[in-house]
Amino acid sequence: MKSSSVITGALTVAIAATLPVLLPSAASDDLGPTATTAPTATARQAPGHRLVIKLASPGVTARATASAEAARVAGQEPQHLGGGWYLLTGVDDVPTARATLSASSGLRAVQVDHVRHAFGDPYYKRYQPYLRASMDVNQAWRRSSGYGVKVAIVDTGVDPRHEDLPKLLNGHDFVSADGNADDGNGHGTFVAGVIAAQRNNGRGIAGISRASIMPVRVLNSRGFGRDSDIARGIRWAADEGADIINMSLGGGRSGRLLKDAVRYATNHGSLVVAASGNSGGTQPMYPAAYPQVIAVGATDIHDQMTWFTDHGPWLDVVAPGDDIASTVPGNRYAVGAGTSFSSPLVAGSAALVLSEHRRWSVEQLRAAVLRGAADAGPVGPDPFTGLGVLDVDGMVGGSAKIAVSSTGPITGTAPSTARPLRNDSIVAASSPEGTDHWFQLDITAPTRVSVSAATRTAKRGVLRGDIELSLYDASFGRLDVANARSGSRTETVRAVVDDAVYVRVRNLKDTRWPSAVNLGIDTSTASAGNVQSGGAPRPALLGATPVPESYGAMRSAPIDLLLGAQVAPGSVDSRSVQLIDGETGLPLARTVNVAGNTLTVTPDAELSATRNYAAVLNGLRTTGGRTLADVRSGFRTAS
């Protein structure tokens, strides 16, 4: 779903915003030139706006109620979408119509019909190194094929004439309302190639599986579509027996219509996989953020999070999504980037698993996919890489990776373990996203202190890292903070103090990939009358046992968290304090005790050996009535 353009001869199709680059024909070794001819086809649209309504109960009376309400508000008969949902088109005054319909006792829900968009063999060795380097797919192919598994691609359609794609299953077009799910955009065909391009046929690329493809067109030729069409496409695919549904599309607003369709598909035996999005932000994207869906982010060939991946606690796994090669209409090939192309790698890998376990339920298949992730980023489950990077061979019975990083535990991740601050202090380039690095500088007399953190530009001169630099006094009151993303390579914090200070370098995102962070100090004598005292907010986490990002934690020992404020015991519940299993992503049974600033989490059963876990605090209140900032403390248990 990254901003993209697929180049197919003399046609460039915009997809949300990526830049897939045209690959040469199979007989050539050089990349072809780009071209810029925009498509002219448009989606079928009714005048006015669109609403969707859900009946309070099924039956003839309820349908009559829906017809009457629709006629009164929109002057037309509603279109049935399935599951008690109906579509109203041509609504001129949406606020008035919603108010009128919401007052009806015959209707359970009224919402806008939201718009969503696509996220953005001769070539195998040269253009698909990620399949070998990151995913170890050659070994996986010796164990499984994915043959016989039906994967529905709910997207812009699929080109049925591409020579490198298998014969497609019967599909449906919900944009033009017919059975021809051809692709006028290119995005869906690209996704299809990632999943199932034929191997060892002397043409093009290799798909990750030999699954069967069911094309379902719900997005128009510009890559946009309505919830009403997407929901119908999901339900149709589930009714047609799709084992897996891939959706490389999404948007920032949730809706009951889409959520109901996802739940329907899951209840009818379809595993739903979706791209997380490409804005690089933390806003949940739907359908990926629904709990029934496996939300997939993107990594580069080195298993590091890409700068464009949308992320958060709703992210489940990550897979390669940078420089991905695949099929595009017209028997052509392209290279693109985006979570749109990470999602089908997960969907295709799930097909490999399911072809060896045909009697498995959706829950069993989902658990196998999540278990088949090697820890990446911060230790344990985290909002940047979820449970980790897809490990395909491990999923199908091969040797599972424990972690993709060999950097080992990180020191200085909490104030209690702060390192001495010197002019040559460095935060290593291998520091994972979201990690805090603490330093302490001893001061014994009034002193003007200036601390700078410098990052280098990344490839092509682009500054990609995002760090936040904070300065705290000896009592952890904040004195200064810097987080400017205006292209500057240096962040600087300053204060006048007469006691020890603490410096926190927080890797917000993407600093790991470009370079290390170099710290510098400048001090000079100051007047006692100018000494400053820090204020709120204090750090949420002052220390932890086990230490954050550490290895070798005792399996039966409690997790002690020293917080920056006293917690109100009444705010502790099953959602605000969780101990997350890094293999399944599920919360474990635990007991919580609060004593002043210390919160102790004790697992009800002994933790597994050499396994990643994370204590996660979300939405806790302090005794002073404030909301404590979210806390995540990951660790790995001893063998």
Image: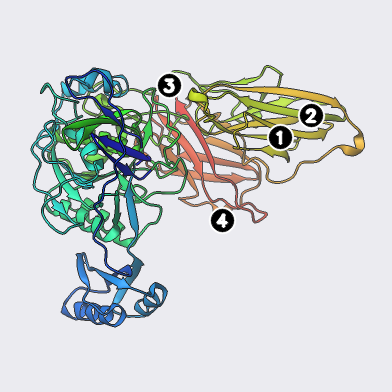
- Location of residue 629 in the rendering, given as x and y in whole percent from the top left corner: 58, 46
Towards the viewer: 265 or 212 = 212
Q: Report the coloring of the rendering.
A: rainbow
Q: Is residue 141 left or right of residue 527?
A: left
Q: Which mark is residue 405?
A: 3
Label 1, on which residue? Answer: 471
Label 2, on which residue? Answer: 449
Q: CA distance from mark 1 to mark 2?
A: 10 Å
Circle 2: residue type: Val
- Location of residue 61 in the rendering, given as x and y in whole percent from the top left corner: 19, 81
Towards the viewer: 538 or 162 = 162
Q: CA distance from mark 4 to mark 2?
A: 41 Å
- Location of residue 549 in the rendering, given as x and y in whole percent from the top left corner: 51, 28
Quadrant of the snapshot with the C terminus? top left
Q: Mark 1 or 2 closer to N-term?
A: 2
Label 4, on which residue? Answer: 570
